């Protein structure tokens, strides 16, 4: 095949596939079968591999992903991405309307659009081609997530039409359709069933479509993003050379260019029209395939928008109207209490099952004693249940009119631990009650161990929560330190454990000993010490002994550590059991000094001393973070980009192309993970 022929075929295939894509994702029709479509795409990918220089900028092969992005570069927005002020009732909107009229008179219209509950995105187009997709970030700079954005089928890689401005920016909301979200959770539950049988830790159920969208957009592997079926509605157009004077015209133009515009928006002559549109969508919005949480009301004419201007946070020409969260009414049957790993006791309302936003609710959170007091609950009460952003719904109020009976039993907060019955303790000025029996209160013990082995802590994924329960029941372990002294014979006591699962469990425990100090510190589960605080403490003090011997005053001096955290850390190390636990973990070989400075501290030279590395791609035998830890531990330096100072690049699968090119230009040695292991040997 000549280059000319290849070029023609690539061009034809590109426009054909883009056309079918648009038909499918925007107009919901398909003119060819999935099989035929896949064949066309396969052929295009094959040709693009043979003739990479002929790949077009709007090639649909980008939709399937494949790029691995290690760190999303931070980019400044050309125009800030502001947020909206909120309103909750008619009065708020009347005030908004009054303010506007006072400033610009009566000659303007409003546009009402639904408020989509997803993740804000800014898309930059140059000469009609999608160049960059950036997250909102702090409003002034966000992350460049272009590769992931390109996998969203309804976002045009190239706009339609001949006369396109050389540059413009489109703003919109990326979302995950409800059905995709539900399916994903079904798949997770299925996977968890398998994991449970294998004695592995279960994956967390996803909380809501918005958080899932946000997490998906930050995934490193764009081919996974591609499979997640995200979608996007656009609601804003910005540019210097646009002959457009109102928001409604901008929406029309965006539609012509091929963007996905939610069809039901309305230009309203006055506030009355706005109220009607809000009322019309109050119920209807629940039948939409995506989550919406309100209406956005915008002054339509750009000139008026300009006159009104913006505050530092939000435009004065727009406001969000929030619909009330969905509520259901049901009977409060009982109130029970749960103990978490820190000993905090939470009240839970057990309800007569009721359907709320499509799922059956049987339990709801009552938060703490103050909240129970505020609600003034009696058993048998009819209560209002509301679903916020979290998985767990909450009780928000009582329908007093229903409370007729004489013999009322008030729902009191408990005085003793629901599990070990120790009396509870309340910190003055805090709403939470604690069980202080951390040494033998069962849910606290299992909660602590679960936290210790969790992904962000020691990451021992060969152990699941079921296994922990069994280990505790069979007295194989009593605390986290015992994990490191488990023998093969101990695990043989667990009846469902076979040779393989025993090996895996022991291997997982052994491997966790490599975790750096900051993870170990986080894993200890000190109250108020999350991942970030653990990192800060580890980097500041560099060893556990220094943290143990420091004073509250000294802890407060550390950046971002307040009195509350300082006291909690200090208290933790005053408990003899905790010190004994740390000693046993130390003896087992866990890291209690910062690996980065291990050599500085000990004055020993590491095998990689004065060598600097860039780690790029995905590896067979290591997580990328593990490789970095290893380098640091051996006295080497980890750099994020390739420069003359780089000695080696450890290249994994899908290593970044730009890094490879730069390495070749600068003559930096590219090594494989196997070569790296040899260096260490
Ligand atoms: S207009 C100046 N229109 O709501 C901001 N925003 O709280 C202009 N959102 O960050 C935004 N649907 O992510 C606009 N139809 C809509 C929207 C919408 C959802 C989000 C957007 C923004 C947030 C503001």
Image (spheres, rainbow, N blue to C red):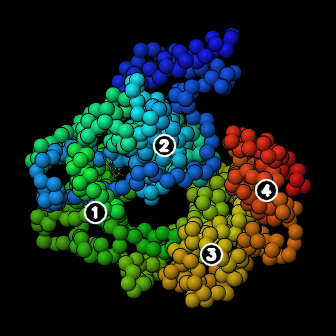
Q: Does residue 643 lie above or below 165 as drawn?
A: below
- Which numbered disc covers residue 645? 4
Q: What is the spatial separation of the Cα atoms under label 3 and label 4, in whole angstroms?
A: 30 Å
Please name the residue that numbered disc 3 is placed on.
Answer: 537
Task: First in sequence, mark 1 or 2: give its number.
Answer: 2
The reply to whether callout 4 and callout 1 are in contact (CB within 8 Å) is: no
Q: Is residue 563 visible?
A: yes
Kindly identify the residue that appears in the image at 30 percent across and 58 percent down.
310
Residue 675 % position (x, y): 85, 47
Residue 588 % position (x, y): 77, 70
- Which numbered disc covers residue 395? 1
The reply to whether callout 4 and callout 2 are in contact (CB within 8 Å) is: no
Q: Does residue 531 lie above or below 655 as drawn?
A: below
Task: First in sequence, mark 3 or 2: give its number.
Answer: 2
Given residues 576 and 534, the one toward you in this image is 534
Kindly identify the residue that appears in the image at 25 percent across and 46 percent down.
302
């Amino acid at each position: 095949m000549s280059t000319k022929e290849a070029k023609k075929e690539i061009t034809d295939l590109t426009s054909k596939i883009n056309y079918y894509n648009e038909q499918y994702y925007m107009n919901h029709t398909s003119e060819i079968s999935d099989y035929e479509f896949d064949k066309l795409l396969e052929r295009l990918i094959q040709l693009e591999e043979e003739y990479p220089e002929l790949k077009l900028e709007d090639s649909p092969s980008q939709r399937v992903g494949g790029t691995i992005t290690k760190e999303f570069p931070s980019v400044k927005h050309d125009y800030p991405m502001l947020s909206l002020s909120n309103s909750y009732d008619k009065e708020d909107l009347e005030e908004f309307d009054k303010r506007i009229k006072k400033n610009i008179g009566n000659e303007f219209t409003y546009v009402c659009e639904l408020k989509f509950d997803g993740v804000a995105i800014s898309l930059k187009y140059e000469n009609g081609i999608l160049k960059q997709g950036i997250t909102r970030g702090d409003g002034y700079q966000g992350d460049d997530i272009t590769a992931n954005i390109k996998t969203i089928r309804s976002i045009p890689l190239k706009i339609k039409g001949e006369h396109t401005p050389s540059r413009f920016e489109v703003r919109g909301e990326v979302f995950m359709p409800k059905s995709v979200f539900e399916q994903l959770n079904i798949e997770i539950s299925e996977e968890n069933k398998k994991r449970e049988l294998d004695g592995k830790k279960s994956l967390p159920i996803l909380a809501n479509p918005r958080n899932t969208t946000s997490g998906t957009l930050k995934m490193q592997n764009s081919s996974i993003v591609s499979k997640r079926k995200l979608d996007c509605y656009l609601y804003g157009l910005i540019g210097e050379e646009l002959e457009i004077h109102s928001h409604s015209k901008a929406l029309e133009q965006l539609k012509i260019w091929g963007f996905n515009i939610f069809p039901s928006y309305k230009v309203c002559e006055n506030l009355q029209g706005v109220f009607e549109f809000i009322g019309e969508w109050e119920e209807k919005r629940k039948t939409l395939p995506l989550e919406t949480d309100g209406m956005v009301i915008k002054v339509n004419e750009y000139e008026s928008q300009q006159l009104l201007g913006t505050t530092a946070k939000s435009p004065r020409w727009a406001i969000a109207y929030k619909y009330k969260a969905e509520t259901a009414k049901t009977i409060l049957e009982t109130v029970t209490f749960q103990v978490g790993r820190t000993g905090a006791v939470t009240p839970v309302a057990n309800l007569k099952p009721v359907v709320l936003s499509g799922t059956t609710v049987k339990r709801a959170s009552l938060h703490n004693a103050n909240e129970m007091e505020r609600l003034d609950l009696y058993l048998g009460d009819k209560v209002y249940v509301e679903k916020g952003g979290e998985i767990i719904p909450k009780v928000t109020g009582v329908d007093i009119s229903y409370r007729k009976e004489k013999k009322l039993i008030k729902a009191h907060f408990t005085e003793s631990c629901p599990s070990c019955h120790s009396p509870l303790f309340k910190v003055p000025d805090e709403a939470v009650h604690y069980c202080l029996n951390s040494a033998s209160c069962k849910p606290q013990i299992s909660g602590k161990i679960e936290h210790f082995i969790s992904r962000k802590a020691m990451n021992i994924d060969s152990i699941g929560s079921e296994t922990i329960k069994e280990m505790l029941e069979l007295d194989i372990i009593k605390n986290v330190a015992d994990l490191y002294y488990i023998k093969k014979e101990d695990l043989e006591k667990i009846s469902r454990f076979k040779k393989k699962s025993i090996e895996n469990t022991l291997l997982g425990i052994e491997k966790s000993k490599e975790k750096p100090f900051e993870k170990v510190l986080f894993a200890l589960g000190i109250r108020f010490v999350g991942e970030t605080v653990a990192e800060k403490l580890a980097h500041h003090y560099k060893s556990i002994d220094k943290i143990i011997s420091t004073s509250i005053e000294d802890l407060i001096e550390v950046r971002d550590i307040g009195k509350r955290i300082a006291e909690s850390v200090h208290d933790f190390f005053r408990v003899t059991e905790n010190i004994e636990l740390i000693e046993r973990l130390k003896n087992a070989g866990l890291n209690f000094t910062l690996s980065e400075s291990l050599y500085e501290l000990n004055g020993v030279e590491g095998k990689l001393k004065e060598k600097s590395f860039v780690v790029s791609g995905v590896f067979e035998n290591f997580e990328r973070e593990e490789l970095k830890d290893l380098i640091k531990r051996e006295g080497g330096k980890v750099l994020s980009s390739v420069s003359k100072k780089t000695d080696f690049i450890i290249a994994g699968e899908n290593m970044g192309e730009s890094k490879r090119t730069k390495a070749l230009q600068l003559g930096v040695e590219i090594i494989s993970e196997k070569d790296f292991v040899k260096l260490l040997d």
